Amino acid sequence: MKIPSKVHFVGIGGIGMSGLAQMLKWLGCKVSGSDRDMDKPENARIINSLKKCGIKLFPQDGSYASKTKPDFLVYSSAIEEDNPDFKAGEKIAKIHRAEALAAAIMSMKNVVSVAVTGTCGKTTVTSWLAETLARMGHDPVMLSGGLVNSFSSAKFAGNFRPGKGKYFIYEADESDKSLLAFKPDYSLILNIGNDHYPITELAEVFRKFISNTSKGVITDETVKDSIKVFPNKKCERLTFGQEKSSEWSLSSYKIEDNLPVAEVFRSSTGELIRLPLPSPGHHNALNAVSILAALEILGLYRKGSDKHVSSFDGVWRRFNIKGKLPSGALVIDDYAHNPEKIASCMRTAREITRGNLFAVFQPHGFGPLKFMKDNLFAEIEKIIKKKDCFIFLPVFYAGGTTSFSPTSEQTVLEYRLNSSKNYFYFKNRDELRSYLLSNTSEGDTVLVMGARDNSLSTWTEEICR
């Protein structure tokens, strides 16, 4: 389909929807939108950017229909069928955000598209690759699932970057299989895990995605093992990972003088590259290796390119250090929301923690919690120490149909039956704050994790005051 000329976004405040809305406006579309959480202060950063881009915003009550008369309603998988905007626009065609993005990409002439996907790390790597290309002078266009610190401006929130270069770097979501709407020139598949689907099912999704790619594919070794037979012999292929057999491999990761450093081996030349990292974490070291592999497959890697990779300024709510509690405990805010991400976050926090770790998690839905709670327990048990605590807040409920089960409290009771470690549930943030102030001390770390609810980030700032 052609790029829509006049569109209305249902749920425009979401991180993926708001970025696409900014992009379509930049491409010349007439854009409007609504969001049920538009007036919440934690969403002001995104909402204000939409207004500055000239996007007309409405309450989510169907009032847009008589005033804008859009050609299409753009929606995401999070929008329920009984949404007031759908009811008011029953005769207006609906398109999923992935379909709208695919049409937008097709409209961009002479663009080289690079889709980044995987169970974990796709927002960070999308943002990191785009910032690396920008630092190298390629002026890319980018659409990310996070607010990139160096791309945030008076006009743009940071999840979309306009550019005049030929590269378009974007995040492709596997959680609802919408990545299959895309036909990228290059695809980068970071990893595979059972966040939303069993690994066998997700492997089949990635196989189809690779078949849709036209020029080149970069995969982690775990993805290579899971998909087994590479389905696209027309494409150039590179691998990265920890195995020496990869074209780009992580030889070592360590902390030197309180700074994270990776050593990366490039098999085609035999180079061993010492790479200072912008933030700690073994998973971040692997992310950096994937960036170097992407530069090579795009024909952009040169000696010295690694310095641009080391200069990444990060993404909002990705291991952001917020300050310290009055007790002296360090406070970190992160978007982690599945077992692999939570485990990586906890391991990274452990690297910089002399004392105890207080890991706080707010599940982002009842369905996701039900799907992942067993795997999450297994991952936590590998990491948590005797005096550490893993703390649940109530499940974040954004509306729509749900079973309201399991609750965080039920999950904690189940964990306690199967472990002697410290698992706690607090029914609200005020009670949790009091507990943290009374039970933490200098050298401890409070790690707050959870997706979809930006007020978590605001809360971490408040408790540091």
Image (spheres, helix red, strand yellow):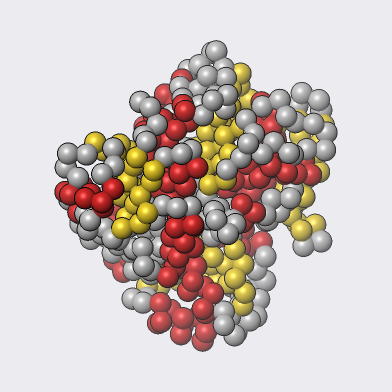
Question: Residue 237 appears in which quarter of the rendering?
Answer: top right
Q: Position of residue 141 (x, y in %)?
A: 58, 39
Give the residue drawn at x 69%, y 32%.
295
Q: Position of residue 169 (x, y in %)?
A: 57, 37
Give the residue drawn at x 39%, y 43%.
30
Left or right of residue 407: residue 284: right
Quadrant containing the N terminus in the rendered view: top left
Question: Residue 420 appears in which quarter of the rendering?
Answer: bottom left
Of the pair 200 and 181, the residue shown nearer to us: 181
Left or right of residue 376: residue 250: right
Give the residue drawn at x 22%, y 39%.
92
Of the pair 257 and 334, the residue shown nearer to us: 334
Q: Please, is residue 332 above or below residue 133 in the view?
A: below
Quadrant containing the C terminus in the rendered view: bottom right
Of the pair 307 and 277, the residue shown nearer to us: 307
In this rendering, the count of numbered labels is 0
Left or right of residue 309: residue 424: left
Give the residue drawn at x 58%, y 59%.
154
Q: Which residue occupies the extreme front position in the image?
A: 67
- Could you tell me if residue 389 is visible in this image? no
Q: Please, is residue 454 above or below residue 165 in the view?
A: below
- Could you tell me if residue 97 is visible in this image? yes
Q: Position of residue 274 (x, y in %)?
A: 81, 43
